[in-house]
Amino acid sequence: MKTSPTRASRLAIAAALLAAIGVPAFSQQQKAPESLLPPGFDQPTPRPQPSARPSPTPSAAPAAVPSPSGDVAPVGGDMGPDAFDVEESNASVAVAPAIDLSQYDLPKGVRRPLNRIGILAAGNAPFPADAFGDVAGATQVTLMRRLDAPVASRWVSIALRRALMSPLDTPRGIDGADYAAERAWLLLRMGEATAARGLVSYVDIDDYTNALDRVAMQVALATGDPAAVCPIVDDAASNIPDRGWALAQAICAGLAGKPSEADQRLDAASKGKPRNDLDTLLATKVVGMGADSRRAVTIDWVGVPALSAWRFGMATAAGVDIPDNLFATVGPEFRYWQALSPAVSPVNRAGAAELAAAAGVLSNAALVDLYAELDQANDVPDPLQKTVRDLRAAYTGSAAERVQAMKSLWDAAESPRLRYARLVLTAKAAAWIPANKNAAEPDRLIAAMLSAGYDSAALQWRGVVAPGSEGWALLALADVGGPIGYSDFERYAGAASPRKAAMLLAGLAGLGRLSPSDAQRGAEATKVGIGGVNVWTQAIDRAGAANQPGMVALLAGVGMQSPRWDQVTPEALYHIVAAMRAAGMANYARMIAVEAVTRAE
């Protein structure tokens, strides 16, 4: 089918918008992550239309996907479980041409239309279909492509993931399949390989465009499942002049039990390449997993200068361990893909999983489940064994013993990012500690609970924590109560670091918990320019006022596109929190404000 034409004028306006945005959290020194897509993604070649597209017709809502319990879903009160299991691709091997495949086609009336694309996750309320309002497709796409993911905030990332994967109306000026491709591509760069896979799989294969073909390949690599592209591999290979598709054809032939065809395709794709070409050897390794294969290779990473999406995907599919040093050559999203991959051993996933939890890719429940697997595994390194023992102890024994075990986990963290990850790891255990004025570590217990959204449990400590303490500040942000007196804020600001005080002021002001005069007074005392205006602040404020939660989530990601939390500014936090509150996302706003104070040094 043909991709929809892009209107140059709209792209120019959107590009100017991004160029003019003074993003408070963005570091000009930040190195952009390596692109995973082959050249030409920005200008996709139209793919021939195999069959007439059915006219969009109303269809039943996609079925909710079961998910493990975990972090919050902002629906009020104690927010429900997090979700990472989404609709899976139904990859299959090509059938012999002699069979008439048309008899198995779905009737046109039940095929999925392209006017609304997305998936549901059980326990999470989706964003509304019109979450981006009347914002043109070209503007949305430009923002998505320019966003230098992953973003700094765990809770902004969670909100953006849920917005991108929700069933959304296709905006004007863009083909539905291309819109799904853009959303899935951003999800991949955020590390959300599983959500991206569900989104790509939602589109019927006959409706794929070249852009969606390319993203589908990257999803298959990020999830370590090259067989996922087999239903589209021949059409894509004929329209996209990329060697990866030729190798994918060989892999699909091998997995279909056609060793002779696989050998021929491998040889053809390897012409002009040295015999020890790693990309070819990895493809050969995967071909060797098929029935009756006569190929067997050994993978040697010595001298390999860098990791790539192809190398990650093929190695993961073939069960080949990737040296840790190679992950330093790519963006953090590769680690998040590794954390989500069931094909990787729990020992190799553990370090990546904690980073993924801090980034919002992995929930508290999923992280605890991984360590439960390690508890039953053999040959676990000593440092991991200690973490497993401490986590087990955090759920057993007296309250004092459990807090001591959690303290051991918190104190073992060697970096700010890992310290926050350990709060996420212990969130559920912390929620099981009864509120007690004599309890040790009340501030960190509250921070741990709120890192995964256990706000009801945390708020039980309101009458326990000391006024002006860190725990008091976090609960002031997490509570949905009335105004905060300026003297209470001033008490905290006098004892906390200047950055923590500034983040608390920005959060309280954005949530409307301070009167306008107190907010201005606190802003002057903490030197937070909440009244500053630039193109980005105008855009996110306008999206909030127009009740466009999807646009707010996307612009919040733009405002938080930094690899380090210390580059996030209180001014950005203020506008993000205020816009989310205005767009009906108050629970996200409260958790983002809590995270800001927790992570500030």
Image (tube, rainbow, N blue to C red):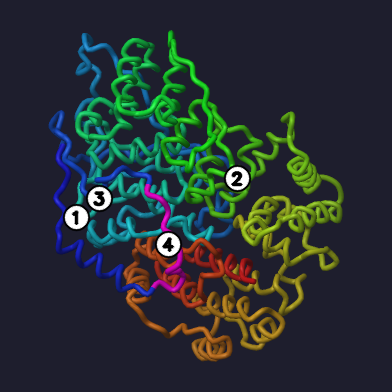
3D distance between C-alphas at marks 1 and 2: 38 Å
Residue located 30% across and 70% down the image: 19
Residue density around tag 2, few if under 14, some if 14–19, many if 20 or more, within 10 Å: many
Q: Which mark is residue 42?
A: 3
Q: Nearer the viewer, mark 2 or mark 3?
A: 3
Q: Picture quarter containing residue 321? A: top right
Please say if the residues under marks 3 and 1 sit with CB atoms less than 8 Å apart.
no
Span colored in magenta: 23-35
* CB atoms of marks 2 and 4 within 8 Å: no
Nearer the observer, disc 3 or disc 1?
A: 3
Q: Is residue 143 above or below residue 575?
A: above
Q: Residue at x 72, y 63 (%)?
A: 444
Q: Does residue 49 appear left or right of residue 237 in this picture?
A: left
Residue 186, image x, y percentages = 38, 51
- Residues at marks 4 and 3, CA–CA distance in whole angstroms: 21 Å
Q: Is residue 195 above or below residue 407?
A: above
Residue under pointer 1: 172
**Side of 163 where 599 appears, left or right:** right
Q: Please name which of the two marks, 4 or 3, marks the residue nearer to the observer.
A: 3
Question: What amino acid does circle 2 point to?
Answer: Ala
Q: Give SS at disc 4.
A: helix
Image x and y of residue 554, in percent: 38, 61
Q: Earlier in the sequence, mark 2 or mark 4?
A: 2
Is 591 positioned to the left or the right of 98 in the image? right
Specify the quadrant that holds the C terminus: bottom right
